[in-house]
Structure formats: structure tokens, C-alpha cells
Amino acid sequence: MEGGVTMWARRARAGLRGWGGVAAMAAVCALALAFVLLLPLTQSRGADDAQTGGQGVAEGVHARAEDCKDPQKQTLSPSAADGPTIEAIKNRTGAKRKLIVGVDQNSYRWGYRDPNNEGAQLEGFDIDLAHRIAADLLGDPDAVQFKAIPTDQRIPAIQDGRVDMVVRTMTISCARIGEVAFSAPYFQTGQQVLAPKSSTVTGYDGSLAGKRICTAAGSTAYTTLEEDRRTGRLPASADISTTVPNQLDCLVRLQLGEVDAVVTDGALAASQAAQDPTVELKGKAFTTEFYGVAMKKDADDLVRRVNQTLVDYGRSGWQTSYDTWLSATLGKDSTASKPPAPQYLRTS
């Protein structure tokens, strides 16, 4: 965490005892261990003759961002075949023979470190999925190296080869599929407003007039706010100038009274509300979005393989992870409580 939030976390750290809400999260972020440098990854074009399969396969070709209408459908059909990208990962030797995954380490119940657990290992819904992908690719769920990256560095980390993939509550969007490749969706959510229970904010509506709103830099939430203020859906007087590197920083800003509301994915907002009983979700979700695993644009074989993993994970593993991490905040019968039905493209 950076700037004023880092200083706040350091001050809070001295008095930390157990899991005390977001203060513990901020302190853990400040204490996070440094990650080792990664070797540049060799990424090459996926095999065109990879086997395809899975349910709901639709004919098509790779979609361009400007032609995109349903970004969650713009992915390749699943395959268990290895290709050049996967072979490069498998050919790493010794201790470096691991899948390198970009994750969050301060999103409660998604990717975070609980100081009450021995070693404060990363855990959460996204972390479970990363372990499953590593197990399918390398035969070992622990053959994964986690690299913590801020929200606005998810795409650069993929493009620069610092990570093989990102599993970090990353929304599949039309703009992003022009920069990275996505798996089929593994979770459905939507943008929502988080504010103090005592606030006059009632939701994503006129009550946000004159309010200071925090979002994460590089997030779909900020893009939505910017567009909606331009078109008049969001009051022109709403102040959206506060952006932060990581979503948890918005909750800290809200607690410190520096902003009046937070806009983020409802799934993340619900977890933040679980950390702090003085805040709550305001109104209903005003968008429909899907999380996907992000990879390099030309890593076709890896995309197909991850999609195969998601098919298998949806049959066995996904529900257990949801019940463990998310059912307490999102419910057992909500739209989010089941894996999304995938649809695929097939390259010609």
C-alpha cells in the first residue's frame, strides 16, 4: 500500500491484536514479504490444432475490442492439450518450476493474509482457483508462486511477462480484451455503492450529488463512473477524483472520512462490509460483470487449458470454495452462488 494509507497502516500496526477488521488488513499489507524477481517468460502463439470441446461452444473468431458486445463470451473453447506456452512453464527447472500468478493480498475472502493463521499464508476464493490451475498444469496445487500486484498493474504485469496469469477479481471487459486474453468467466458480480450506515447516500442515484467517491485506479468502476457522469446518469457534481492503487485503500479512506462513498464490485464491497460493521451496501448492483483469469493475448493454449480447468472446477471444487469464503456475505441462493455458464468462440 502506498502514500497516506501506508503511513496509516504503520501507525495502526503497533496496536494490532488478532483480526480486527480492515486495520489488520492494512497492517498485513504493510508487513507483506517482498516477492522474488521473476525470470522473463517466453510466450508464443498457441497451437491452432488444439482439441476443442465443452458445453455451449459457439462458432466465431477472435473478437476485436471495438466489435465486442458480450466480453465474457470472447474466449476459446476448452482443451486439455499442451502447447508452447504451457510447455515453457513446464520446462522451468528446480524451484522455478512453478506457475506464476498475479493476485491480491488485501481483499478479504478473495486474496488476503489472515494474521491469525500460522504463517499468514495467502488464502481466499481467488487463491483456491490459482491452486487448482497449478494442480492441473503441473500436478501440484502448491507449484504456484504468488506475486502481489495492485489493481492498475494487472494488465502491465501480464504484458511484461512478470506473471503467467492474473487471478485477481478482474472483470472481463471489452476494453481489456484488446490488451489481454481472458478465460471463460468464473464469477458473476456487479458494481455497487458502499457507504457508512449513517450516510444519506441511498445507492447509485441522485444521492451521490456532491459526494466524494473513491475507486481503484484502472478498475471498471472508475471507467463506469467517468462515462456515467459524462452521460448524466451520475450527477455532474459527484467528485470521482479519488483513486487508489488497491481497492482496500478506498475502505480506509472511507473510514478516515476522506471520501463519502466507495464504488466497487458488489462481491468485494460485501466482504468489506463484513470487515467493518459501520458501513453497508447502498442500493442494488447497477451493472452485470464477470471475473475471468487474464493471460497474454497470444497464449491460446494456456487460455484453452484454463478453460478446461474451469469446466472441471465447476463440477467439483468451485462450490466448496464459494461456501468456504463467500456464502456468509453473498448468500447461498444468490446469482453469485453458482459458477456462470460458459460460452466460447472457436478459431477458424
Image: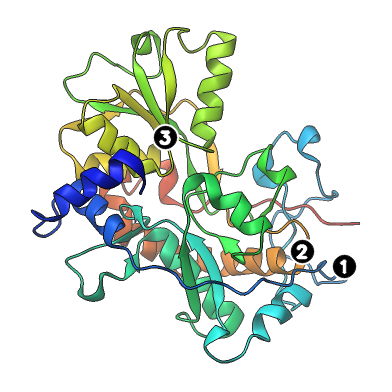
Q: Alpha-carbon distance for marks 3 and 2?
A: 30 Å
> At 54% from the left edge and 38% from the top edge, which residue is drawn?
218
- Please, which residue is most extreme toward the right here? 348
**Of the residues under marks 3 and 1, which one precedes in the sequence?**
1
Viewer-proximal residue among 82 and 38: 38
Residue under pointer 2: 300
Q: Alpha-carbon distance for marks 2 and 1?
A: 8 Å
Residue under pointer 3: 264
Tell whether 198 sits left or right of 244: left
* Residue 78, horizontal then vertical, whole percent: 71, 65
> At 35% from the left edge and 67% from the top edge, which residue is drawn?
122
Viewer-proximal residue among 306 and 78: 306
| Secondary structure at numbered mark 1 | loop
User: Which residue type does callout 2 highlight?
Assistant: Asp
**53 versus 157 height, above or below:** below
The answer, for residue 115, to whether it is visible in the render is yes
Residue under pointer 1: 48
The image quarter containing residue 120 is: bottom left
Q: Are marks 2 and 1 in contact (CB under 8 Å)?
A: yes
Tell whether 343 sits left or right of 120: right
> At 63% from the left edge and 54% from the top edge, which residue is drawn?
184
